[in-house]
Amino acid sequence: MADAFWENFHGPNRGYIEEQYELFEKDPDAVDPSIKSMFEKYGVPVWLDQGITDATPALTNQVNIEKVTAALKLVDAIRRYGHLEAEIYPVGKPSNRFSAVLDPGTYGLEDQDLKDIPSEWIWPEAPNHLNNGFEAVQELKDIYIGTIAFEFDHVDNEEERAFLQKQVESGHYRVDLSSQQKKQLLNRLAEVEGFEQFLGKTFVAQKRFSIEGLDMMVPILDHIIESSCDDETEHIMMGMAHRGRLNVLAHILGKPYDHIFSEFHHSPNKDLVPSEGSMGINYGWTGDVKYHFGAHRVVNTEEEEGPCTRVTLAHNPSHLEFVNPVVEGFTRAVQDDRNQNGYPKRNVDKAFSILIHGDAAFPGEGVVAETLNMSDLPGYSSGGTVHIIANNIVGFTTPREQGRSTRYSSDVAKGYEIPIIHVNADDPIACLSAVKLAYQYRKRFHKDILIDLVGYRRYGHNEMDEPRATQPILYKEIDEHDTVAKLYADRLEKDGLVDSRYFNQVKEEIESKLRKVFENMKEDEKKQADHVKIPDVVEANLEDISTEVDLDRLKSINESLLQLPENFEMYQKLGRMLKKRKKAFDEGSKVDWALAEALAFATILQDGTPIRLTGQDTERGTFAHRHLVLHDVNGNDTYSPMHGIPDVKVSFDIRNSPLSEIGVLGFEYGYSVQAKDALVLWEAQYGDFANAGQVIIDQFIAAGRAKWGQATNMVLLLPHGYEGQGPEHSSARLERYLQLAAENNWSVVNVTSAAQYFHLLRRQAAISGTARARPLIVMSPKSLIRNDRIADDPVEFTKRSFMPILEEALSDDPKTVERLILGSGKVMVDISEYVDQNKGNWSKNHIVKVEEIYPFPEKRVAEVLKKYPNVKEVVWVQEEPKNMGSWDFVKGTLHHLLTEEQQLTYIGRPNRSSTAVGEPNIHKTEQQRIITEALKPSKGGETRERD
């Protein structure tokens, strides 16, 4: 092809090309970009390569090389910037869609100049029917400046760009429907429109967030599902906000019309509220609004018996876009095979994601960028997502120019080299062609691609909203604009495929069908829903779970943790540190926090539960304690000691996460929901950093089961402990998790010993995949990780399970105890250390470390009070400020446990707006005051305060 191209140059044009090539060889940027592109594409001019000079006379109608160069610039501009003039807006078209960069005059070209140039000179792959450059330019404009437009010049990968350009310019991506398929498409659009119109007439002024104006979303999803069935994809995971959700539930997920109608009568049918990843039904007990629920559907093929794919639409709160990483977690969990030692093996063709975004939310919500950033990371890639922006060109009442700083809402994707297809939602064939191209790209390259489906919304943000108050001109145009179904019906009528009555007949049939379903609904389907009782397994505590492990087994695991692959050499200082663990089971030695964790993980793996552990710097550990991924000092090889544990047939997947909280936390939540067999842990670099993931914590982890029946067993490790390191490095905001704690939705702990952590992790793994599953929030230690006081004798790992409280007796005679000191976490270790280091009579005190704060061990504390009948004062000690930490959560329960004669006292920091000081000396002074006050009788306190 290169030789044929260069043969078109003769006479003086060859001289010009030779001169330019000499410059190009010295400095490629010294020549015009279009000529540079020509040399990069076709290489050295053939006559130079062959060492011959041009003796061929010039053509009679000699083409000016400068005009050829200008034409090449124009063609390049059409490919790159054709979208600027494309007819992608059904309504609300921006006033200035002319771009000088697409005008031949900008390049000094007249029509005749283009006609004088052979078409193959400026478009080597030009179709045979094109006779000259003018026709080639017109053809390219038809391709790039129509109701579908493309942006992929920002994609760096040459193979991907070439694939996209070939698909677009050859027309291979265009769908070619038969007459029957065109009628089926019209019928589908009539269904979509008819459903919305029926809801609007039947349930007047009720919110439904209509799809109207973006009706083609449903046929687009139909096309993806059909293609997935052909490719035998097992799972399609979908996430979307509320715009069009009811229509998608009805026509893509197959949710029966009567179930949707019943929800408008405030009677949600729980049969359609399944948990993602579960074939069964998990009942929620508070429920949610109808346009937040998800569902799943097993799609069957018409030709063969049995399912071809399973479609899951994720539950989603009103927090736009936050479902994105959750869905990606679903997909990755399906793709991962966790049934072998080492990292999971992936099959990216087993499942993929579809994410439907809002045009205002896509550039506006940071979670979008966080999710896109994960798309090509080893621990988070899901093999390519099809993104669809449901572009209704207005964000609630906010116009485009007030909602984003970019031309298109899709521009965020350019930074991640994601190809973008803009398409007019009023052109059904263009829409289906866009999704065909998107699907093929994702299938071939396993990378994300985005469809900007540009439409409008026929009504306001919701059906109770009046949009004409804020967008009067736009809605005047919308009021006069036919629906896509009507427009397509007119097109088919013009083509002679249907007559003038066909569309109305179809609409009447759909109206009749919906009316019949509604009228045949039973009366009890319209009544108020009954309260759903919390399942007994959720109400029950977890104290009956046995987690002890045989000592010989632990010793054997400890030995295997220190084995390295042959010729693998780790950092010398690290090697010395890890080898100290070899003596942990010698007489008189103890097991520290890091080793306890490693032993817990190893035993969990041997028991058959796969583990996924992620977070910022988690492979090493923020505090350089974990080191579960070792690095060879002589190369780039890495090795995880967890992959060398004997008798393991499940995966251990440990990953350093990107510097993200909301995105990664959502991903891990989604992974844990789907991978019910696994123990999924996320670790914050510092506990307070979880603040940036608060929406996922509030809306999904804490409340997902109560709202949607969606269970998770994930663990949040949140470093917590006051050491004078400032607010963000001190508090994990314990009070926030306690404020969200109710109905046994999770466990919140602040443990003070390595063995407690060991048993806690094993307990959490034991409930994986069971109805008892619930999240675990761990206020994990910082400096305590290396504190000998929290290291434990090996026997503590073999003789007991997790204890909700730990007692430390300071007197041999229970009758002498007058003061009960309760608290949790680091401050309790500091108190114990103070007692050991300072001589004195502490016999009037008894220390109780509350290891599990929620569910609060009320029964255990009551037993302690009964054991010490002379207690006059119960002290709650905490290092957090009074308006933070556990105090407000525990004080009511503690009051009810006390007699009229007993006093309840708070000892800690006063109310504060910031969680902690940043000056170490001030911290030490305050901490010392708290410790000494806790061990001395109080002169007052919050006595007899009742809740």
Image: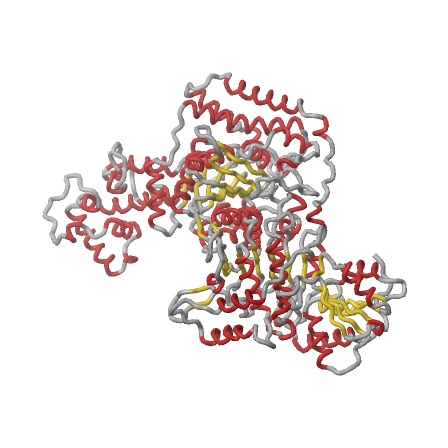
Q: Which of 699 and 552 is in front in this view?
A: 552
For the C terminus, the quadrant is: bottom right
Residue 544 falls in which quadrant of the image? bottom right
Instruction: Check the image and tell me how it is coloured.
Output: secondary structure
Foreground of the two, 896 or 650:
650
Q: The N terminus appears in which quarter of the rendering?
A: top left
In screen coordinates, is 567 left or right of 593? left
Spot the residue most to the right.
901
Instruction: Name the one closer to the observer, 465 or 812.
Output: 812
Q: In this view, does 116 lie above or below 520?
A: below
Left or right placement of residue 581 versus residue 811 in this view: left
Residue 683, position as x, y percentages in the image: 57, 61
Q: Which residue is drawn at 40% across and 69% down?
A: 568
Q: Position of residue 680 (x, y in %)?
A: 56, 55
Q: Where is residue 715 in the image (x, y as percent from the top left)?
A: 60, 57
Q: Is residue 799 left or right of residue 370?
A: right
Q: Position of residue 450 (x, y in %)?
A: 46, 44
Asked if one can make out residue 872 in the rendered structure from this viewpoint, the answer is no
Q: In this orientation, which residue lies closer to the viewer: 175 or 414?
A: 175
Q: Which quadrant of the view contains residue 601? A: bottom right
Q: In this view, does 84 lie above or below 345?
A: above
Is residue 116 shown to the viewer in this render?
A: yes
List the single residue furthest toward the bottom. Answer: 839
Residue in the picture at 29% in, 39% down: 110
Counting every numbered tag in the picture gives 0
Q: Quadrant of residue 927?
A: bottom right
